[in-house]
Image (spheres, grey):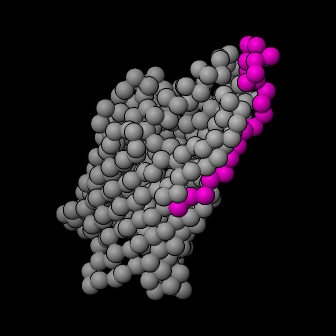
C-alpha cells in the first residue's frame, strides 16, 4: 500500500504499475518466491501429499522495501495425502501492488504413480482470483478529473493450473503450467467500459539433486526456470548446504536481477522456519533495497505414534 500521499496522473500511475509487473525481477503476474525449494507446492500442484504428512506453510514476502506501494505477498497453504496414491491441498494468497490487490483461493488434487524407488505425481489446481483496483488510494491534483473517485474496480477470474512432479529421496524434477484458462472481464479505466483482460500462462521447470557426503552434511544444487509470454525466461540458480538435516544455509543467483541469501532451520522435528534476503543488482533492486521473505512450516504426522522426519525437499 502507499504509505505516502502521491500526486500523480492516473495514466502515469497505471504505467508505473505495468512496469512493476513487467520488470525482469518480477516478470510475471504470479507472486515471486525465493524459497520455492522448501515447499514446491507454492509453484506446482503435483507436490500435494508428497511429504506424507499434513503440511502447513505460511510465507510472507516484502519486495523492494524502500519503494512505497511495492509488491507485498502472503500465502497460506496446506496439503496432505488423502489416500494411498492421492493428495489434496488448499492455498490462500494475497498480493498487493500499490492500489491493486489480488486474492486467490485455490484447491488442489494430485495422483501419484509409485515406482520401486521413485514417484511420479500429477496435479490439478482450480480456484478463483479476485482483482481489485482501489482508486480511493490515489490522491489527484485535479479532483474534477474524469478518472478520480471511481471507487473500487474489480473482477473475478476462474483459474486452473496443472503440474507434474517426479521425485526420489535425493532428486526432484517438476513442470507446472499456470492459468490454463486465462480470460477475465473487468472495467477499463480509460474507456469506462467492460473489456477482456488476460492472465498470461506461466511455466515453471525445476530440477534438483542432493549430494549426501555424510549423514550430517549434504549439498543440494537446484534450478528453477520461469517462462511467461512476452517476457524473457527467468532463472534461479540455487545451492543449499545442509547440516544434520536440521539446518540449511545457501544462496540463489537470479542473473542480472538479484543475489539471494537463504537459511532454514528445523526448530523441532515438525516445526521449521526460514528466511531469505534478496539483494537487488539491477537499478530497481538497488533503489528498492532488496526484499525480505520469511516462512513458517509445520507438519502433522499421519502416524499415531510416529514423528515427521526432516527431509531434503
Q: Position of residue 92 (x, y in %)?
A: 61, 57
> Given the current orientation, which residue lies at the most extreme left position?
213
In this view of the protein, which residue sits in the foreground, 136 or 255? 136
Q: Is residue 299 visible?
A: no
Residue beneath the point at 52% across and 57% down = 181
Is 130 on the left or on the right of 231, as rendered? right
> Given the current orientation, which residue lies at the most extreme top position?
141
- The image quarter containing residue 165 is bottom left
Q: Position of residue 293 (x, y in %)?
A: 49, 44
Placement of the C terminus among the 4 image quadrants: bottom left
Where 60 sits versus 119, above or below? above
Q: Position of residue 39 (x, y in %)?
A: 44, 60
Tally of numbered tags: 0
Residue beneath the point at 61% across and 58% down = 158
Placement of the N terminus among the 4 image quadrants: top right
Which residues make up the magenta segment?
139-160
Amino acid at each position: 500500500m502507499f504509505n505516502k500521499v502521491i500526486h500523480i496522473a492516473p495514466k502515469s500511475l497505471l504505467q508505473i504499475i505495468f512496469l512493476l509487473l513487467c520488470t525482469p525481477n518480477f516478470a510475471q503476474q504470479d507472486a515471486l518466491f525465493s524459497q520455492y525449494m522448501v515447499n514446491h507446492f507454492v509453484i506446482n500442484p503435483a507436490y500435494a501429499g508428497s511429504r506424507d504428512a499434513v503440511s502447513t506453510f505460511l510465507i510472507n514476502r516484502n519486495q523492494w522495501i524502500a519503494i512505497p506501494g511495492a509488491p507485498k505477498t502472503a500465502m497460506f497453504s496446506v496439503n496432505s495425502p488423502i489416500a494411498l496414491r492421492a493428495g489434496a491441498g488448499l492455498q490462500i494468497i494475497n498480493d498487493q501492488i500499490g492500489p491493486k490487490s489480488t486474492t486467490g483461493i485455490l484447491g488442489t488434487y494430485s495422483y501419484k504413480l509409485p515406482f520401486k524407488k521413485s514417484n511420479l505425481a500429477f496435479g490439478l489446481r482450480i480456484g478463483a482470483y479476485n482483482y481489485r483496483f482501489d482508486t480511493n488510494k490515489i490522491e489527484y491534483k485535479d479532483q474534477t478529473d474524469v478518472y478520480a473517485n471511481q471507487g473500487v474496480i474489480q473482477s473475478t477470474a476462474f483459474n486452473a493450473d496443472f503440474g507434474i512432479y517426479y521425485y526420489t529421496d535425493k532428486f526432484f524434477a517438476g513442470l507446472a503450467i499456470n492459468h490454463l484458462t486465462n480470460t477475465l472481464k473487468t472495467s477499463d479505466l480509460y474507456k469506462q467500459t467492460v473489456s477482456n483482460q488476460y492472465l498470461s500462462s506461466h511455466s515453471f521447470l525445476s530440477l534438483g539433486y542432493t549430494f549426501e557426503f555424510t549423514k550430517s552434511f549434504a549439498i543440494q544444487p537446484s534450478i528453477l526456470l520461469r517462462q511467461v509470454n512476452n517476457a524473457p525466461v527467468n532463472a534461479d540458480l540455487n545451492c543449499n548446504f545442509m547440516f544434520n538435516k536440521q539446518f540449511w544455509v545457501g544462496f540463489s543467483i537470479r542473473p542480472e536481477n538479484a543475489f539471494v541469501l537463504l537459511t532454514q532451520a528445523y526448530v523441532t522435528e515438525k516445526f521449521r522456519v526460514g528466511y531469505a534476503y534478496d539483494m537487488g543488482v539491477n537499478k530497481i533492486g538497488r533503489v528498492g533495497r532488496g526484499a525480505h521473505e520469511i516462512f513458517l512450516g509445520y507438519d502433522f504426522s499421519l502416524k499415531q505414534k510416529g514423528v515427521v522426519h526432516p527431509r531434503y525437499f
